[in-house]
Amino acid sequence: MKRACVIGAGFGGLALAIRLQSAGIQTTVIEARDKPGGRAWYWERDGFTFDAGPTVITDPPCLEELWNLSGHRMADDVDLMPVSPFYRLNWPDGTVFDYSNDEAHLRAEIARISPGDVVGYEDFLRYSAGVFEEGYVKLGAVPFLDFSSMIKAAPALARYQAWRSVYSMVSSFVESEKLREAFSFHTLLVGGNPMNTSAIYALIHKLEKDGGVWWARGGTNRLIAGMVRHFERLGGEVRLGDPVARVETLGSRVTGVLTRSGWHAPFDAVASNADLMHTYRDLLSDNPRGKQQARSLARKRFSPSLFVVHFGVEGTWPGIPHHMILFGPRYKGLLDDIYQHGVLPQDFSIYLHHPTVTDPSMAPEGMSTFYALVPVANMGKLPVDWNEIGPVLEKRILDEVGRRLIPDIHDRIRTKFHYAPADFATDLSAYQGSAFSLEPLLTQSAWFRAHNRDDAIPNFYLVGAGTHPGAGIPGVVGSAKATARLMLEDMK
């Protein structure tokens, strides 16, 4: 029986492992941390459950397919709950916009803010449907291994003006600045600047509209637990708390892996779901390919990091929906500070996550779980001491949530902690503390992104946010589908 190793138990790594094991490849997943999940890690403190993220689950069929491969049902392991509205958007002047796939309600929300933009929204929806078909359905799980594959995709990308940014394209359909922000902010959820990220990412609107937004009962961590349970049911092995120290090679072939504890095993193929730079610079440091790729990656642009405040409060808040975006006073200027200038601005926009309004099990009775997330520049652009800055920024964020939603928030908090760029770097070996790997620019997408199969080591593969198609649950699960197809073909 052929044997494969997957390094890292994030969504991409587990999805790949399930596909390989379902096809009869004896697969071992090796995870550095004491729990699976990667960025979907979690904490349990004082009776509260805090998911590290991601918290937005879209396109459930891409997940269900992982169970269907072996004749099982995802519903036996994971309970998905619908979330509506998808997001409530709130601006400093008090304007509120509920974003959902309730067609009548969404059009009424648009008309309330800018009646003249209802027709423009219809045009944007048609555009989103087109790029969804071309960019997600047709190309989302197709590996781009050579430039000719990019050339073949170019006409469709050109037809949808992929060189333009999401914000630019949205602006061509609607006039209201608030609606331009409402229909372009989604790229931030995969590490992209709406002002620079390719308009192809407008497909996210169609993805959410058709598939909905979901929550796994018990937290995103329960979806990870369900994937692990299913993988082990198929006969796969998961090794936790033992980081891979080296991917062993002989010439241009991978031969096995060695972990920090000294555990060693030979494998016919190895795939990495770990950070790209860590993979090449550290795990493949003994092979010339590792050094070469590390130098190449250092010239690329990595996505920003995140600063997340997790807090549990006394009381329940039925008026605060599951997902909120609290926009700050600036949009483009704030994005420039984060992506271009590398400064920590005085203002910010907050993604507020409130899972207990959907799933009370995330907190003790009569309590609520929240996290407030703000994008910040990565450590390559913003080399500050987060031990010093963290408590200051934490208070500013909680003050803003209190000012806009929970006036006595500081009195109600029962537990809190924050997670900063330095934690991404330490816990996840994330280069520059990036939260989403490579920034999703057009010049860092598809063939220009790290390839699903290494060009020089033919039995070494990549899966996850750093390879095609990119970050987000559907993206990394799509990368697993692309990588699995390559591995299964190569291992016949």
Image (spheres, grey):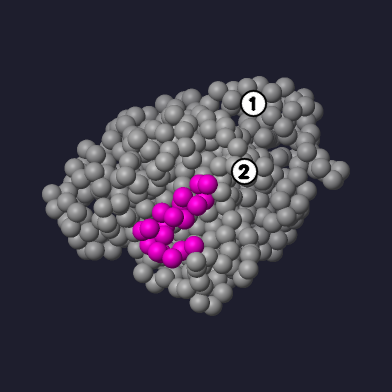
Q: Nearer the viewer, residue 370 or 450?
A: 370
> Which residue shows up at 56% across the image and 38% down it?
434
Q: Is residue 258 above or below residue 407?
A: above
Label 2 SS: helix
Image coords of residue 87 (percent x, y): 36, 58
Residue designated by label 2: 387
Label 1 SS: helix
Residue type highlighted by circle 1: Ala
Q: Nearer the viewer, mark 1 or mark 2?
A: 2
Tell me if 292 is positioned left or right of 195 in this view.
right
> Which residue shows up at 45% across the image and 73% down it?
316
Examine the image and state in which quarter residue 46 appears: bottom right
> Which residue shows up at 57% across the image and 35% down it?
384
Visible in this render: residue 144? Answer: no
Image coords of residue 145 (percent x, y): 54, 30
Image coords of residue 165 (percent x, y): 33, 34
Examine the image and state in which quarter residue 348 appears: top left
Image coords of residue 318 (percent x, y): 39, 72
Q: Nearer the viewer, residue 427 or 222?
A: 427
Most distant residue in the left direction: 116
Residue designated by label 1: 294
Tell me if 175 is positioned left or right of 472 in this view.
left
Give neighbour class at mark 1: few <14, some 14-19, many 20+ (Cα, 10 Å).
some
Counting residues from the start of the chain, the first of labels 1 and 2 encountered is: 1
Instruction: Identify the mark at residue 273; answer none if there is no mark.
Output: none
Judge whether residue 407 is colored magenta: yes
Q: In the rendered structure, which segment of residues is drawn in magenta? A: 392-410
